[in-house]
């Protein structure tokens, strides 16, 4: 059993004043010894404040494991986990060890306290974050378990989804022949059934992030509430900034992300020129903190949750999801970013399942650690990836189509790449072929011949993710026009409104665009954050 009391950050003792401020929004009740207060799988469960007695935090029995009491929670403390804020169903249960008097603080009241009381907000948020970090080290991580082939695209997608959403989980990577049979206590599968997700011990074969999200309560479900104030479509830096600023300024805000929060920034191993981080910051860390900040302000984050359409209804907007569900909103900010470009090579689709990556983070590094790799691209993302992989023992071939590495890459990266003996630079070069039986073994470069490679990291740019939107004024490359950039023909529809488009507003009133999807954007993390937050100023003017 974890001694949570040894870490006051994990279970802090509430002062009398803090207790009084929290309980004024809560309801009191008495519970008997052995009574279950929170059951595994419960949605929108409350925070439990303990006035007297003692509670047990329990990881319920799984079919291969007996239940385990993870912690005891006594007077002056509270029970609850980060799911209180992000909407995840309870994956642990809480029961009374002894007759106890408790207070139930519902999730809505908790969010209100977090937004209105800075002292309580900081204390509770730090505690919930610390608890999640502590729980991931023990058997609580077995409540969400992934089993799959270590280098498969589907297995990596599950892990990336769980890590981006900071879900407590464990992953078991297997090395299998294509026709192998896998045995697990109580189950037997063929290789084609992988990956398998165990959720509270129940097995889901051929699992996807969407299946896992639905089972955890993280997918969008229609409610009886009216139109929300703001829907943000895309969870990269621009989308997170828009959602945070919108929610912190009182807007009822939803954030939809087709994969998992982060966008291309979340796939970056190290960002060194972002304001306030003199020693650099990983994309995953930056996005993780931003997502937590969004949740703190009451943003409801749904992922994976992809939009397939956006239409005006006269008095508002409707966002249509790929599963047919419809979200009604008073305004929308499109921050759907861009989709990664691919090389048109034979067997690209085949190797994309096992050995081609569009990110260079710790997750991808585990697949190629110490092995030779190829990085394609001449921008900052490619440079950061090359340095990250080289610093972790990989022999790196950096393939750049242009002749001048400094044309698109920051000088500080160029200097470090040129000085790194593990990085072999191939300017004015192209990748012309891929080789390997089951996984990538070699890459053909037109100026250097064949080089050994266990992974290909592709950073050759991206196309705007606007194919799902109809009716918006875009340029010839598909990037959305906004503000004064909207074409004259499209502006005619605004005459009845008696105004011109506001900054970041698209050709459809009340629909805004920010970040990489917008024509003229800087394609930098800091610029995307600025655009997302600035768009909210225009949203407020429209809603007013």
Image (tube, rainbow, N blue to C red):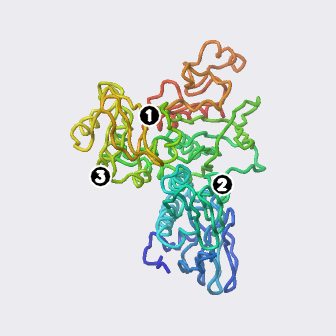
Marks 1, 3: nearer the viewer: 3
SS for callout 2? helix
* x then y, percent, for residue 41: 68, 67
SS for callout 1? helix
Mark before the other along the chain sequence, 1 or 2: 2
* x then y, percent, for residue 396: 31, 43
Report the residue marked by disc 2.
211
Report the residue marked by disc 3.
393
Mark before the other along the chain sequence, 3 or 2: 2
- What is the CA distance from the residue labelled 1 to the residue labelled 2? 34 Å
- What is the CA distance from the residue labelled 1 to the residue labelled 3? 33 Å
Residue shown at 59% from the left, 83% from the top: 54
Is residue 16 or residue 113 the one in the foreground? 113
- Which numbered circle lies on residue 527? 1
**Neighbours of disc 1 within 10 Å: few (<14), some (14-19), many (20+):** some
| Left or right of 508, for residue 465 | left
Q: In the rendered image, is residue 21 in sight?
A: no
Q: In which quadrant of the rendered view does residue 387 lie?
A: top left
* x then y, percent, for residue 248: 56, 47
Residue 300 in the image: above or below residue 532: below
């Amino acid at each position: 059993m974890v001694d949570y009391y040894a870490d006051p950050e994990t279970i802090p003792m509430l002062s009398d004043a803090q207790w009084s401020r929290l309980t004024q929004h809560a309801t009191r009740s008495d519970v008997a010894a052995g009574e279950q207060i929170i059951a595994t799988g419960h949605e929108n469960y409350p925070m439990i404040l303990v006035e007297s007695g003692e509670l047990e935090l329990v990881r319920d029995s799984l079919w291969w494991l007996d239940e385990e009491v993870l912690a005891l929670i006594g007077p002056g403390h509270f029970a609850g986990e980060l799911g209180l804020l992000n909407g995840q169903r309870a994956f642990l249960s809480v029961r009374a060890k002894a007759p106890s008097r408790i207070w139930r603080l519902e999730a809505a009241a908790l969010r209100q306290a977090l937004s209105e009381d800075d002292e309580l907000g900081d204390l509770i948020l730090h505690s919930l974050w610390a608890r999640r970090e502590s729980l991931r080290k023990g058997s609580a991580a077995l409540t969400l378990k992934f089993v799959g082939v270590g280098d498969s695209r589907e297995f990596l997608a599950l892990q990336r989804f769980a890590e981006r959403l900071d879900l407590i989980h464990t992953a078991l990577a297997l090395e299998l022949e294509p026709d192998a049979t896998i045995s697990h206590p109580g189950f037997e599968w063929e290789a084609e059934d992988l990956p398998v997700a165990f959720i509270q011990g129940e097995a889901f074969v051929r699992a996807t992030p969407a299946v896992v999200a639905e089972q955890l309560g993280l997918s969008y479900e229609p409610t009886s509430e009216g139109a929300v104030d703001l829907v943000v479509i895309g969870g990269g830096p621009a989308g997170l900034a828009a959602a945070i600023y919108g929610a912190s300024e009182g807007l009822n805000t939803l954030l939809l992300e087709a994969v998992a929060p982060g966008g291309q920034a979340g796939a970056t191993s190290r960002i060194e020129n972002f304001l306030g981080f003199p020693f650099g910051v990983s994309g995953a860390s930056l996005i993780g903190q931003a997502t937590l900040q969004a949740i703190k302000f009451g943003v409801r984050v749904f992922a994976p949750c992809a939009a397939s359409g956006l239409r005006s209804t006269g008095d508002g907007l409707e966002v249509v999801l790929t599963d047919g569900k419809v979200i009604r909103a008073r305004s929308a900010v499109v921050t759907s970013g861009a989709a990664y470009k691919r090389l048109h090579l034979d067997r690209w689709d085949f190797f994309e399942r096992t050995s081609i990556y569009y990110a260079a983070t710790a997750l991808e590094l585990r697949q190629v650690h110490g092995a030779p790799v190829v990085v394609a691209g001449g921008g900052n993302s490619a440079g950061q990836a090359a340095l990250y992989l080289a610093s972790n023992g990989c022999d790196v071939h950096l393939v750049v189509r242009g002749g001048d590495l400094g044309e698109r890459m920051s000088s500080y990266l160029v200097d470090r790449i040129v000085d790194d003996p593990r990085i072999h630079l191939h300017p004015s070069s192209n990748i012309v072929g891929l080789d390997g039986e089951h996984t990538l073994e070699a890459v053909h470069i037109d100026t250097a011949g064949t080089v050994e490679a266990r992974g290909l990291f592709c950073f050759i740019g991206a196309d705007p993710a606007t194919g799902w939107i109809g009716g918006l004024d875009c340029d010839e490359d598909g990037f959305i026009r906004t503000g004064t950039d909207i074409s004259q023909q499209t502006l005619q529809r605004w005459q009845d409104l008696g105004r011109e488009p506001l900054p970041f507003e698209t050709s459809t009133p009340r629909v805004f665009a920010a970040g990489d999807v917008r024509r003229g954007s800087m394609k930098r993390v800091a610029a995307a954050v600025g655009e997302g937050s600035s768009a909210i100023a225009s949203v407020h003017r429209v809603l007013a």
